[in-house]
């Protein structure tokens, strides 16, 4: 399940972006970490299959965005299955 409610949590730069973690179910499918992607302005936040857009892998529900762009986040479980992307968030 994809992270939900991707949002800007602070103003200024860098700014914190946060998301709602998919609900844990006590199974192998629970998220263990998150992949943060940054795309150029004007894109729609895809394709996530190109690793050049990965800016970080984090183990919490927050990332400090230091550059403008279109951000999306995916959840990854302990067997390295990656979720579909969150809704895109534009950081100016």
Image (tube, helix red, strand yellow):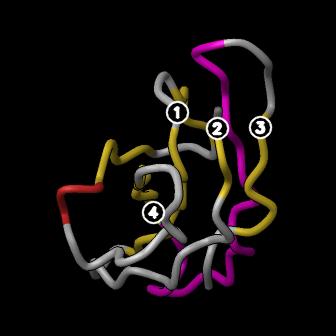
> Residue at label 4?
32
Q: Nearer the viewer, mark 1 or mark 4?
A: 1
Q: Confirm or deny contact between disc 1 and disc 2 (CB under 8 A).
A: yes
Q: What secondary structure is found at the residue carrying circle 1? A: loop
- The part of the image, by quadrant, that contains residue 26 is bottom right
Is 48 above or below relative to 71? below
Residue occupied by mark 1: 68
Q: Is residue 92 magenta?
A: no
Residue range (magenta): 13-31
First in sequence, mark 3 or 4: give its number.
3
Is 90 above or below relative to 76? Answer: above
Q: Quadrant of the C terminus?
A: top right
Q: Residue at horizontal 62%, vertical 38%? A: 62
Task: Answer with mark 3 or mark 2, whichever residue precedes in sequence.
Answer: 3
In terms of secondary structure, where does tag 2 sit? strand
Between circles 3 and 4, the one closer to the viewer is: 3
Sort mark 2 into few (<14), some (14-19) or many (20+) by Cα contacts within 10 Å: some
For disc 2, the marked residue is 91
Front disc: 1 or 3: 1
* Residue 19 x/y as whole percent: 72, 53
Tell me what residue is drawn at x 68 percent, y 75 percent: 24
Separation of residues labelled 4 and 2 (CA atoms): 25 Å
Residue that numbered label 3 is attached to: 8
Disc 1 + disc 3, Cβ < 8 Å: no
Q: CA distance from mark 3 to mark 4?
A: 22 Å
Quadrant location of the N terminus? bottom right
From the viewer's perspective, tell me whether residue 6 is left or right of residue 41. Answer: right
Q: Is residue 68 left or right of residue 61?
A: left
Q: Earlier in the sequence, mark 4 or mark 2?
A: 4
Residue 16: percent from the left, percent from the top?
Answer: 67, 27
Please provide percent x and percent y for residue 29.
49, 86
Q: Could you tell which of marks 1 and 2 lies nearer the N-terminus?
A: 1
């Amino acid at each position: 399940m994809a992270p939900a409610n991707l949002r800007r949590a602070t103003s200024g730069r860098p700014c914190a972006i946060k998301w709602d973690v998919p609900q844990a179910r006590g199974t192998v499918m629970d998220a263990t970490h998150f992949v943060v992607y940054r795309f150029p302005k004007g894109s729609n936040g895809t394709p996530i299959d190109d690793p050049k857009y990965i800016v970080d892998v984090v183990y919490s529900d927050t990332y400090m965005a230091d550059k403008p762009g279109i951000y999306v986040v995916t959840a990854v479980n302990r067997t390295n299955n990656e979720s579909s992307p969150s809704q895109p968030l534009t950081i100016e």
